[in-house]
Amino acid sequence: MLKRAPNAAQAALPLDDAPGDPPASAIATAFAGAGDGDDTLQRYDWPAVSQQVDSQGWGLLPRLLDAAQCQQMAAMYDEAAHFRSRILMQRHAFGRGEYQYFAYPLPPLLQALRTRLYARLQPLTEQWRQQLTSAAPPWPAQHAALLARCHAAGQQRPTPLLLRYGAQDYNCLHQDLYGELVFPLQVIVLLSQPGEDFDGGELVLTEQRPRMQSRVQVLPLQRGDAAIIAVRERPVQGTRGSYRVQHRHGVSTVLRGQRHTLGIVFHDAE
């Protein structure tokens, strides 16, 4: 299901609006106060994270953002200048709640996250491509090169999004595709604190293997935690070689309060 397809009436952004990789100084500023040095991602054991994602289709990055960064990011929701469009889920039968797609240029912290996380995730996605003996070209090492490929394919709109849920809101199971070119992984960051800001509203993942019932996983996220998840599929080794496992994700019903989430999709949209 192409859950996040943009409205066809919206004009695509020109190529000049799409940023490349930010300079190191911009990344250092964006991550200031958020961990060890100018690359907060260095704190994680990336071989272990990649193994987790490879084996089950998801992995966790605890405390990717601190409380202040979460609050600042969530507060952007009411600042229209940051966004290109707003979607009411109920209107499209996506669930209940709403979300907004960021416009280019992205906020510095979000731009830094998108660039740096891509570089960490690309090796695993390239491994997956080779396992599936895909005829598609290799995934580029740098995110700017992926964006250039997206734009050449007519996918020119930024896809990072900010989601807001209130009481009784939810998000149906879906896949964030946006076009033919789909980078296999995405990142979801919880910006609100369970038990304080909201109750319910768990991130739900499903895995569908051929000729088997779906497996459901609920991820135990806290504010600032990030989940790396498969967008659509991942390879699993079987007795006769690798086969494709299908993935979807959604959000269970929020019982109380307000829940904000940051979604980082690496490919752009048609």
Image (spheres, rainbow, N blue to C red):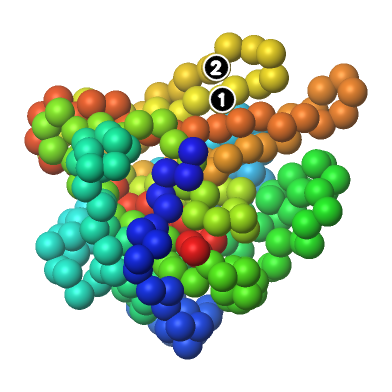
Residue sitting at x 42%, y 78%: 13
Q: How many marks?
A: 2
Using the image as rendered, state which of residue 163 and residue 41 is in the foreground: 163
Q: Amino acid at mark 2?
A: Ser
Element carrying mark 1:
strand
Judging by the rendered image, the residue that carries numbered circle 1 is 207
Q: In x, y percent, where is residue 209?
A: 66, 21
Residue extending furthest toward the bottom: 16
- Disc 2 from disc 1: Cα separation: 5 Å
Judging by the rendered image, the residue that carries numbered circle 2 is 214
Element carrying mark 2:
loop
Q: Does residue 196 lie above or below 125 as drawn?
A: above
Using the image as rendered, state which of residue 227 and residue 82 is in the foreground: 82
Q: Amino acid at mark 1?
A: Glu
Using the image as rendered, state which of residue 214 and residue 203 is in the foreground: 214
Callout 2–callout 1 Cβ contact below 8 Å: yes
Determine which quarter of the picture holds residue 101: bottom left
Q: In x, y percent, where is residue 206?
A: 50, 25
Q: Does residue 63 lie above or below 217 as drawn?
A: below
Residue sitting at x 60%, y 23%: 208
